[in-house]
Amino acid sequence: MRSRRGLFTVTLAFAATVTSALDVRNYDEQGVLAPVEKSITKATEHTRGAIRPTVLSTELVTTTALPGSDTPAEHWTPDRYDPYVCEYMGENGCWQPSEPGDGPPYSHDGNWPSRSKTCVVEACNDKNGDDAPAILSAFDECKEDGHIIFENTTYYVGTVMNTTGLKNVDIELKGTMLWSTDIEYWLQASLPVGFQNQTSAWHLGGEGIHFFGYGAGTLDGNGQVWYDYNHGQSNLHGRPHAITITETKNSVIEGLRFVKSQMWTMTVARSEKVLLQDIYVNNSSEDREFRSNVNTDGVDTVYANNITMLRWTVDCGDDSISMKQNSTNIYIANSTFYNGIGFAMGSIGQYPGQIEVIENVTAENIVTYNSRMGGRVKTWTGLNTGYPPNGGGGGFGYAKNITFRNFELHNAQQAWAITQCTSYNGVKGGCDTSRFKIDGMYWGNTTGTITGTNVATLQCSKASPCENIELVGNHVVRAGSQDKVEGYLCSNVQGKKGFECTGDCDQNRCPH
């Protein structure tokens, strides 16, 4: 039996799930089991309610390489993370929520207290200047029990900013922060995020932060120069995210506008109990060609727990909202998406041998216009090819208890999708090799129009079939007509409820 509370509680004991997800036997590209001398033995230990693999003695390893990887097993550590994470966070790059059993929706009730100190950021009023030093000075002066005010003017930001470690700080943005177009500088200097070799223009973090803009305060990334320069390339290294909310707790970010973000708009990383509400994102490109503004996600979460998003409006060229590795207890409601792809759980499973999870995500009361779909789960294959951000694969873990309900779709290609074929480096195949587990998808009570012939395409891996997929109450019609759409393409789906498969995901009929 599932209760509402059950949606928002991190599972503390999931040995059975991990055992399934950690099947490390060798599969070929068609998902057929291949013989090995002996299975790799894995042990786990609990850390604050989550589990991670323990380092194994190489004497237990009899295979010559980690399945799906060219890395010799004797040199492989199961807890291998993105090198940026290791450099930025220290040993293993591990972040765990301090209160893993505490789920959303997180809210802040009552008035914010007055602060003991006020710092007004003085603008240089020079479009060729750099207000970053003045901004950093204000944050340093008012970093504890402070009130930082950006006046109703334009602040020109020409260098990276790290304003973390704040304690009980209000940030009031009345005007506009406008980032420079010095592409060469940003490619070299942007700050590591600690995931996928991604980088950011601004790191903001702390406890008890209230960042607000009255619906008018704007962060302008000057992104058109990036869209033109990037020219559809996926995950250009050094192209910065607009802002990374990092190491943040018990905080509220509200009433902000983001326009023309350089890449991902907002990354919420290693944070918990954060409310993000009344956020406007418009990353539309002057060039409406396909992929001109690729990678301009609205928001991505990574190593994040108990995050609430309310009343977002997002127009972008990629994922509207995305949960990535170790995102738990996420609640999104009353939001509208234009263009873009919709919700994305993933991509995930990119790092060979690493356990990653996405668990307890609920999105409801969502309206989309011309988005590719309502929501999807996307995992990497079980074959490791190359390095992040565009290469990878071979990761373990699971996506579990994902609820999408009460969606209204306008001219979507389809409502829902699962794909376990993800790769961004041009490598094809391996769609049946992923051992990343997808279990407990509840998607439905959805209306609207779609341009395709399928409500959902569910391409699950033969090496680890999807389980407990419930698609109920999806009443969508073909755009331009009232013909009900009833197609469901499936591969390796077990435990279906509310629908019947009408075909297979073969001959590239299911989107990757």
Image (spheres, grey):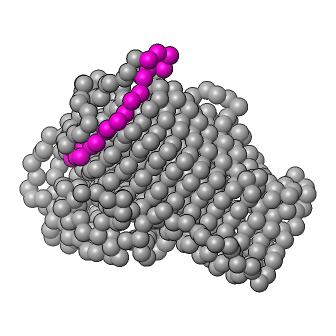
Q: Nearer the viewer, residue 492 or 101?
A: 101
Please tell me in which quadrant of the rendered image residue 103 appears: bottom left
Please tell me in which quadrant of the rendered image residue 474 appears: top left
Residue 317 at x, y = what percent?
A: 58, 37
* Vertical comparison of 61 with 496: above or below: below
Q: Nearer the viewer, residue 72 or 109?
A: 109
Residue 56 at x, y = what percent?
A: 22, 71
Residue 243 at x, y = what percent?
A: 64, 58
Whether residue 49 is visible, yes or no, is yes
* Vertical comparison of 380 with 327: above or below: above
Quadrant of the snapshot with the N terminus: bottom left
Q: Name the outermost residue toward the bottom.
A: 116
Name the residue located 45 percent from the left edge and 53 percent from the top edge: 323
Quadrant of the snapshot with the C terminus: top left
- As for residue 470 lying within the magenta part, the answer is yes
Q: Nearer the viewer, residue 503 or 395?
A: 503
Left or right: residue 303 versus residue 31 is: right
Q: Nearer the viewer, residue 233 or 307?
A: 307
Residue 219 at x, y = what percent?
A: 72, 53
Magenta extent: 464-482
Name the residue located 71 percent from the left edge and 62 percent from the top edge: 212
Whether residue 341 is visible, yes or no, is no
Left or right: residue 367 versus residue 257 is: left
